[in-house]
Image: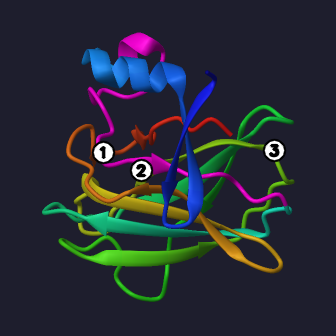
Amino acid sequence: MGTHDRESTGRKMRIPWWMLAVCASGLSLLSAGCESTCTTHRSAACYDTPVEPITSFRVVTVTGDDGTDGDILFCIELKSRGGDICRSLDTAVDDFRQNQTDIFDVGLTADAGDLDSFFLENQGGATFGNNEWKIVGLTVEAQTATDSFVIYDEPGITCGNVIDTGQTYRPMRCAW
């Protein structure tokens, strides 16, 4: 009864039983102890993490109608240590433009089974003054020495997705 399994694109998806109960009841995830103001992450899907060590992450973001030139970080939290480990999402092109999809390869590592959670943080610092950013889609892949695995996919973020300086976007908590 700990998780609900469902086949999706050939990989098992594990959803904690309590998340199903909260979603079915219509209660806020915030009242269930999650750090989200959304009532549900309706389009979110969690997938198993790889059994091999994670050598890097690929983060795909989709910006809505409010882009930014601020500094956006991808952060992970590990079970084995306190604190966050963050890297800037930045490429040679103009990232986070209105209605644009961006792909970032992030050099962060994690031992197999040690990933606890991840989130995006807006550090501000916009050159042209627009620090506010609206994210409408997020996919995270964990890459190993031999393969790549989608561990989180949320193609339709509709609430709690405007991130200003000092704010974070915390996806649905997965049961890793």
Estimate how packed mark 1 is, as few (under 14), some (14 to 19) or many (20 or more) residues with alpha carbons within 10 Å. some
Q: Secondary structure at mark 3?
A: loop
- Toward the viewer: 121 or 130? 121
- Residue ID at (59%, 61%): 11
- Residue ID at (31%, 67%): 62
Q: Say what amino acid the circle numbered 2 marks.
A: Asn
Compared to 10, does 115 lie above or below? Answer: above
Q: Work out whether residue 112 can be spotted.
A: yes
- Toward the viewer: 76 or 11? 11
Q: Are marks 1 and 2 in contact (CB under 8 Å)?
A: yes
Q: Secondary structure at mark 1?
A: loop
Is 43 one of the magenta-colored residues? yes
Quadrant placement of the C terminus: top right
- What is the CA distance from the residue labelled 1 to the residue labelled 3? 29 Å
Quadrant placement of the N terminus: top right
Q: Earlier in the sequence, mark 1 or mark 2?
A: 2
Q: Say what amino acid the circle numbered 3 marks.
A: Asp
- Residue ID at (51%, 54%): 7
Compared to 118, does 110 lie above or below? Answer: below
For disc 1, the marked residue is 164
For disc 3, the marked residue is 114
Chief secondary structure of the magenta portion: loop
For disc 2, the marked residue is 122
- Location of residue 147 in the rendering, given as x and y in whole percent from the top left corner: 73, 78
Q: Say what amino acid the circle numbered 1 marks.
A: Asp
Residue stretch rendered in magenta on the structure: 30-51
